[in-house]
Amino acid sequence: MAKTVPPGSPIHVRKLRPDGSQAYAWDGVVLRCDETGIVLRAQFNIDFRDLGYTTFRRGDEFIEFYYWDRCYNVFQISSPDRTLKGWYANVGLPAELSPESNELSYVDLELDVWVPPNGAFLVLDQAEFDALLTEHPELVEAAERGRATLLALVESGRLPRWTEEQIVT
Protein backbone atom coordinates (compact mmCIF):
# COMPACT_ATOMS: atom_id res chain seq x y z
CA MET A 1 0.00 0.00 0.00
CA ALA A 2 1.76 3.10 -1.19
CA LYS A 3 -0.74 5.81 -0.28
CA THR A 4 -1.83 6.77 3.19
CA VAL A 5 -4.37 9.07 4.77
CA PRO A 6 -3.09 11.66 7.26
CA PRO A 7 -4.19 11.58 10.92
CA GLY A 8 -7.26 13.70 11.57
CA SER A 9 -8.73 13.00 8.14
CA PRO A 10 -12.36 11.92 7.91
CA ILE A 11 -12.90 8.40 6.62
CA HIS A 12 -15.94 6.44 5.47
CA VAL A 13 -16.01 2.72 6.34
CA ARG A 14 -17.97 0.11 4.41
CA LYS A 15 -18.53 -3.39 5.81
CA LEU A 16 -19.28 -5.65 2.86
CA ARG A 17 -20.80 -9.10 2.46
CA PRO A 18 -18.89 -11.66 0.37
CA ASP A 19 -21.10 -10.83 -2.64
CA GLY A 20 -19.88 -7.22 -2.47
CA SER A 21 -23.12 -5.74 -1.16
CA GLN A 22 -22.93 -3.32 1.74
CA ALA A 23 -23.94 -4.59 5.19
CA TYR A 24 -23.19 -1.40 7.16
CA ALA A 25 -21.43 1.93 6.73
CA TRP A 26 -20.20 4.59 9.13
CA ASP A 27 -17.83 7.52 9.38
CA GLY A 28 -14.74 7.97 11.49
CA VAL A 29 -11.48 9.91 11.84
CA VAL A 30 -8.04 8.52 11.03
CA LEU A 31 -5.70 8.18 14.01
CA ARG A 32 -2.83 6.44 12.17
CA CYS A 33 -2.29 5.09 8.68
CA ASP A 34 0.90 3.36 7.57
CA GLU A 35 2.26 0.37 5.65
CA THR A 36 0.70 -2.13 8.10
CA GLY A 37 -2.82 -0.75 8.24
CA ILE A 38 -5.06 1.97 9.55
CA VAL A 39 -6.44 2.91 12.96
CA LEU A 40 -9.50 5.10 13.22
CA ARG A 41 -11.93 6.44 15.78
CA ALA A 42 -15.69 6.22 15.25
CA GLN A 43 -18.74 6.61 17.43
CA PHE A 44 -21.53 4.08 17.63
CA ASN A 45 -24.37 5.63 15.66
CA ILE A 46 -27.38 3.59 16.82
CA ASP A 47 -29.29 4.49 19.98
CA PHE A 48 -29.01 1.12 21.72
CA ARG A 49 -28.00 -2.42 20.81
CA ASP A 50 -28.21 -5.27 23.33
CA LEU A 51 -26.11 -8.20 22.16
CA GLY A 52 -26.75 -10.30 25.27
CA TYR A 53 -23.10 -10.33 26.36
CA THR A 54 -22.68 -6.53 26.12
CA THR A 55 -24.56 -3.42 25.07
CA PHE A 56 -23.59 -0.65 22.70
CA ARG A 57 -25.06 2.84 22.97
CA ARG A 58 -24.95 5.91 20.79
CA GLY A 59 -21.69 7.71 21.54
CA ASP A 60 -19.66 4.62 22.51
CA GLU A 61 -16.15 5.09 21.14
CA PHE A 62 -14.77 2.51 18.73
CA ILE A 63 -11.04 2.52 18.05
CA GLU A 64 -10.85 0.34 14.96
CA PHE A 65 -7.71 -1.49 13.83
CA TYR A 66 -7.61 -2.67 10.20
CA TYR A 67 -4.74 -4.37 8.39
CA TRP A 68 -3.75 -4.52 4.73
CA ASP A 69 -2.49 -8.11 4.96
CA ARG A 70 -4.42 -9.74 7.82
CA CYS A 71 -7.77 -11.53 7.62
CA TYR A 72 -9.29 -9.85 10.66
CA ASN A 73 -9.92 -6.47 12.25
CA VAL A 74 -10.34 -5.44 15.87
CA PHE A 75 -12.51 -2.77 17.50
CA GLN A 76 -11.58 -1.51 20.98
CA ILE A 77 -14.83 -0.24 22.50
CA SER A 78 -15.26 2.22 25.35
CA SER A 79 -18.19 4.09 26.81
CA PRO A 80 -18.24 7.88 26.24
CA ASP A 81 -16.41 8.38 29.57
CA ARG A 82 -13.59 6.16 28.14
CA THR A 83 -14.37 3.15 30.37
CA LEU A 84 -13.23 0.11 28.41
CA LYS A 85 -16.10 -2.22 27.49
CA GLY A 86 -13.99 -4.72 25.54
CA TRP A 87 -12.92 -5.72 22.05
CA TYR A 88 -15.05 -6.89 19.16
CA ALA A 89 -13.05 -8.65 16.48
CA ASN A 90 -14.17 -9.71 13.02
CA VAL A 91 -12.74 -12.36 10.73
CA GLY A 92 -12.71 -10.77 7.29
CA LEU A 93 -10.65 -10.15 4.21
CA PRO A 94 -7.85 -7.58 4.52
CA ALA A 95 -9.03 -3.97 4.47
CA GLU A 96 -8.77 -1.93 1.29
CA LEU A 97 -8.27 1.83 1.21
CA SER A 98 -9.19 4.30 -1.48
CA PRO A 99 -7.13 7.37 -0.47
CA GLU A 100 -8.74 9.46 -3.24
CA SER A 101 -12.17 9.12 -1.61
CA ASN A 102 -11.01 8.41 1.98
CA GLU A 103 -13.05 5.20 1.91
CA LEU A 104 -12.08 2.01 3.70
CA SER A 105 -13.82 -1.29 3.01
CA TYR A 106 -13.56 -4.87 4.13
CA VAL A 107 -15.44 -8.10 3.47
CA ASP A 108 -16.87 -9.58 6.65
CA LEU A 109 -16.65 -13.38 6.94
CA GLU A 110 -19.24 -13.70 9.73
CA LEU A 111 -17.12 -15.12 12.57
CA ASP A 112 -16.70 -12.65 15.42
CA VAL A 113 -15.06 -12.71 18.82
CA TRP A 114 -16.06 -10.64 21.87
CA VAL A 115 -13.41 -10.07 24.57
CA PRO A 116 -14.39 -8.19 27.75
CA PRO A 117 -11.68 -6.43 29.80
CA ASN A 118 -11.17 -9.55 31.98
CA GLY A 119 -9.86 -11.46 28.94
CA ALA A 120 -12.55 -14.15 28.84
CA PHE A 121 -13.91 -14.43 25.31
CA LEU A 122 -16.86 -15.62 23.27
CA VAL A 123 -16.63 -16.93 19.72
CA LEU A 124 -19.74 -15.72 17.91
CA ASP A 125 -21.57 -16.78 14.77
CA GLN A 126 -19.77 -20.09 14.21
CA ALA A 127 -22.79 -21.57 12.36
CA GLU A 128 -22.95 -18.53 10.04
CA PHE A 129 -19.19 -18.80 9.43
CA ASP A 130 -19.48 -22.49 8.55
CA ALA A 131 -22.41 -21.79 6.19
CA LEU A 132 -20.51 -18.96 4.52
CA LEU A 133 -17.54 -21.22 3.84
CA THR A 134 -19.85 -23.83 2.31
CA GLU A 135 -21.37 -21.17 0.04
CA HIS A 136 -18.01 -19.53 -0.77
CA PRO A 137 -15.30 -22.23 -0.85
CA GLU A 138 -12.89 -19.70 -2.40
CA LEU A 139 -12.81 -17.92 0.99
CA VAL A 140 -11.94 -20.96 3.12
CA GLU A 141 -8.17 -20.41 3.21
CA ALA A 142 -8.36 -16.72 4.14
CA ALA A 143 -11.16 -17.32 6.64
CA GLU A 144 -9.39 -20.15 8.43
CA ARG A 145 -6.11 -18.20 8.52
CA GLY A 146 -7.91 -15.16 9.97
CA ARG A 147 -9.74 -17.29 12.54
CA ALA A 148 -6.56 -19.04 13.70
CA THR A 149 -4.51 -15.83 13.94
CA LEU A 150 -7.26 -13.90 15.68
CA LEU A 151 -7.94 -16.62 18.26
CA ALA A 152 -4.20 -16.91 18.98
CA LEU A 153 -4.10 -13.14 19.69
CA VAL A 154 -7.19 -13.37 21.89
CA GLU A 155 -5.94 -16.37 23.86
CA SER A 156 -2.55 -14.75 24.46
CA GLY A 157 -4.07 -11.41 25.51
CA ARG A 158 -2.33 -9.56 22.67
CA LEU A 159 -5.21 -7.71 21.02
CA PRO A 160 -4.26 -4.20 19.90
CA ARG A 161 -4.94 -1.41 22.35
CA TRP A 162 -4.98 2.31 21.77
CA THR A 163 -4.04 4.34 24.83
CA GLU A 164 -5.09 7.86 25.70
CA GLU A 165 -1.58 9.14 24.95
CA GLN A 166 -1.89 7.92 21.36
CA ILE A 167 -5.22 9.58 20.65
CA VAL A 168 -4.95 12.40 18.14
CA THR A 169 -7.24 15.31 19.00
Image: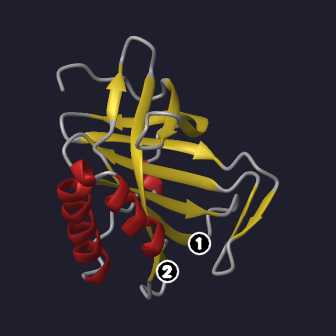
The colour scheme applied to this rendered structure is: secondary structure
- Extreme residue in the right direction: 47
Give the image location of residue 27, x and y in percent.
Answer: 59, 33
Instruction: Please state if 41 lies on the left or on the right of 34 as rendered.
Output: right
**Residue at the (22%, 65%) spot, across then down:** 144
Q: Residue 11 has which mark?
A: none
Q: Estimate how packed mark 1 is, as few (under 14), some (14 to 19) or many (20 or more) residues with alpha carbons within 10 Å.
A: some
Distance, label 2 to label 1, CA atoms, is 7 Å
Q: Position of residue 8 (x, y in %)?
A: 48, 28
Whether the residues at callouts 2 and 1 have beta carbons within 8 Å, the answer is: yes
Mark 2 falls on what kind of element? loop
The front one of 109 and 34 is 109
For label 2, the residue is 117
Pointer 1 residue: 85
Does residue 65 appear left or right of residue 144 in this picture?
Answer: right
Q: Residue at x 41, y 65 (%)?
A: 131
Q: Where residue 17 appears, x then y in whole percent?
A: 47, 43
